[in-house]
Amino acid sequence: MSEDQIRAAVASHNSTAANHGNWTLVTIKNGKPELVGTGNGVSSLSDALSENTVGLALLTLRLELEAIPDQPRNIYLQWVGPKVSRIQAAKSSEAFNHVVNNLLIPNHGQIFVKGKNDFNEQVLATRWHPSAGSHEIH
């Protein structure tokens, strides 16, 4: 999959009409970004996150911000599956920087995801914000 395909998938997030729960998942294969898939809903995104891979996702949630309801927020999620070695995670970091800075844009917050125990919409809706404190999910 090319970067153009990833950009096309991300374009669905970059509209005031973006659907709540839309997600785009990218991984790195042979040093290059590859589109894993797209979908809707936090539970389907969770299902798409493999325990032995690293990935980046862009998730759109429509949230209330400053008393204004239904505001789309694009949240960047960095996934490191529990069965991923530290070496594998480190090898992906340089390519991930390119993806985050050039493909998964814009994003309004970042969350590092290490497990699925707390991976749900309620936690995501609070942890993305810069003032949230912890930006990790285990």
Image: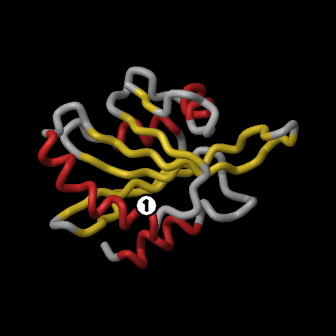
> Mark 1 packing: few (<14 Cα in 10 Å), some, or many (20+)?
some
Mark count = 1
Q: How is the image coloured?
A: secondary structure
Where 56 falls versus 44 (above or below)?
below
Residue matched to label 1 = 100
Q: Position of residue 49 (x, y in %)?
A: 33, 41
For image coordinates 49% across by 49% down, the residue present is: 76
For image coordinates 21% across by 46% down, the residue present is: 89
- Split into 4 quadrants, where in the image is the C terminus? top left
Locate residue 83: give its quadrant: top left
Describe the element under mark 1 as helix, strand or loop: helix
Q: Is residue 31 left or right of residue 96?
A: left
Q: Is residue 94 left or right of residue 137?
A: left
For image coordinates 57% across by 55% down, the residue present is: 107
Indicate the amino acid at tag 1.
Answer: Val
For image coordinates 30% across by 72% down, the residue present is: 1
Looking at the image, the residue that sits furthest to the top is 117
Q: Position of residue 46 (x, y in %)?
A: 40, 36
Front one among 120 and 96: 96
Locate residue 2: give its quadrant: bottom left
Q: Position of residue 5 (x, y in %)?
A: 41, 74
Q: Is residue 5 left or right of residue 51?
A: right
Q: Position of residue 82 (x, y in %)?
A: 22, 31
